[in-house]
């Protein structure tokens, strides 16, 4: 984040602290609970947001060298990303063109070819079909048109984006709507992937995301852990197209009042969260980054799966402990979220409300409605 932006935000933070109220929207809003329970809505989300919109599937640090590869199975389409012999990323549907078997699982390195475990049809790192055992049974097959189904892929700022349908090239900066400058300034492209854990919960994927976009609950739900560290209800929201930035403010921000502006540094006194539409939450802490990639669990409206990753400048055993601590906090949110999902599915509540200081929630859901073509 540019220093001038930090200075502006810190001034706004001090103004909010001094007047005793956070920045607020003009009015509170409502959202239909069917957004979390409707099978028809869920089907549109899977098609529009998770098939036709670029999503983050991993990190450049996971696949730095030719032959390195990763797979993504959490979305509706199984994806294989590999760095080819020229060092370029290629992405494919992770399905053999013969009979549809999954070609490879997990992550790996030094791959030259991928051989299907079912019948050993083999493809190179550019997706070309290079070998068919007992090929006489497929006389007339055109190998040139029978390679892996290619998908658009792009990497920037240490993030790897893929669209799960063949489509136009991915324009990352355009998609980020001005948020790219912030992401670049944090230099996460120089961070290394430390660990990823996957959490499955009985709650709609948007409920998982919701918990990050308001500070209202922190003083209550997290009163025994992180709650005392943060200024009550205070967070700074800015929209960047369908993305947004949300800055949670620590009480330690008061230390900056006695310093000249040129020495102001927001990062040690805040948690900076970015929503990379539609389903990725990037959280910048003072010494590392956390990434939450949230997906619907298959076709189940009320189930989700979240991949939680830590990126950091250097490897250390402490990151495993950091992961344990952050999971302890978010598990509190997820436990409440499962209860919310159960309540929504009962049909007893038709609307929920977003307060005037919960404007990031309203922006998140309005962006989804716009993407789906809803009024």
Image (cartoon, rainbow, N blue to C red):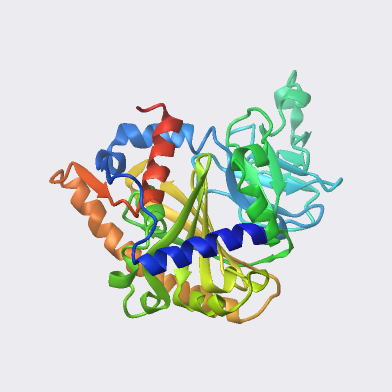
The residue most toward the left is 348
**Visible residue check, residue 169:** yes
Where residue 220 appears, x then y in whole percent?
28, 71
Q: Identify which residue is drawn at 53% across, 80% down.
A: 255
Residue 99 image-quadrant placement? top right
Where residue 98 appears, x then y in whole percent?
63, 32
- Give the left or right position of residue 192, taking residue 218 as reference: right
- Give the left or right position of residue 253, taking residue 220 as reference: right
Residue 40 image-quadrant placement? top left
- Give the left or right position of residue 296, taking residue 216 as reference: right
The one nearer the camera, 218 or 57, is 218
- Give the left or right position of residue 215, taking residue 132 as reference: left
Where residue 273 appears, x then y in whole percent?
51, 59
Q: Name above or below for residue 103 compared with residue 372.
A: below
Q: Quadrant of the N terminus?
A: bottom right
The one nearer the camera, 100 or 172, is 172
Q: Identify which residue is drawn at 50% across, 74% down.
A: 253
The residue most toward the top is 140
Q: Quadrant of the C terminus?
A: top left
**Visible residue check, residue 95:** no
Where residue 34 appears, x then y in whole percent?
26, 39
Q: Identify which residue is drawn at 68% across, 70% down.
A: 262
């Amino acid at each position: 984040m540019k220093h001038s932006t930090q200075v502006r935000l810190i001034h706004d933070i001090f103004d909010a602290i001094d007047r005793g109220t956070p920045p607020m929207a003009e009015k509170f809003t409502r959202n239909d609970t069917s957004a979390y329970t409707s099978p028809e809505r869920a089907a549109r989300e899977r098609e529009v947001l998770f098939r036709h919109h670029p999503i983050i599937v991993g990190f450049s640090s996971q696949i730095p060298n030719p032959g390195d590869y990763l797979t993504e199975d959490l979305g509706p389409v199984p994806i294989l990303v590999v760095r080819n012999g020229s060092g370029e990323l290629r992405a494919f549907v992770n399905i053999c063109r013969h009979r549809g078997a999954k070609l490879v699982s997990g992550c790996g390195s030094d791959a030259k070819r991928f051989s299907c475990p079912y019948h050993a049809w083999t493809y190179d790192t550019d997706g070309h079909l290079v070998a068919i055992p007992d090929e006489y049974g497929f006389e007339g097959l055109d190998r040139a048109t029978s390679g892996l189904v290619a998908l658009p892929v792009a990497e920037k700022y240490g993030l790897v984006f893929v669209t799960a349908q063949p489509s136009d090239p991915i324009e990352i900066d355009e998609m980020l709507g001005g948020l790219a400058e912030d992401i670049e300034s944090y230099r996460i492209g120089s961070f290394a992937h430390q660990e990823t854990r996957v959490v499955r919960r009985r709650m709609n994927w948007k409920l998982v995301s919701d918990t990050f976009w308001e500070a209202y609950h922190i003083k209550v739900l997290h009163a025994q852990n992180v709650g005392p560290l943060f200024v009550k209800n205070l967070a700074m929201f800015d929209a960047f197209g369908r993305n947004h930035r949300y800055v949670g403010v620590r009480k330690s921000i008061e230390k900056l009042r006695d310093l000249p502006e040129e020495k102001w540094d927001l990062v040690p006194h805040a948690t900076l969260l970015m929503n990379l539409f539609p389903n990725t939450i990037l959280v910048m802490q003072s010494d590392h980054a956390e990434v939450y990639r949230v997906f619907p669990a298959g076709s189940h409206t009320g189930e989700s799966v979240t991949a939680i990753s830590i990126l950091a400048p250097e490897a250390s055993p402490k990151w495993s402990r950091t992961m344990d601590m952050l999971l302890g906090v978010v598990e509190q949110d997820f436990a409440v979220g499962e209860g919310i999902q159960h309540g929504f599915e009962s049909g007893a509540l038709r609307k929920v409300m977003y307060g005037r200081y919960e404007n990031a929630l309203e922006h998140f859901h309005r962006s989804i409605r716009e993407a789906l073509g809803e009024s």
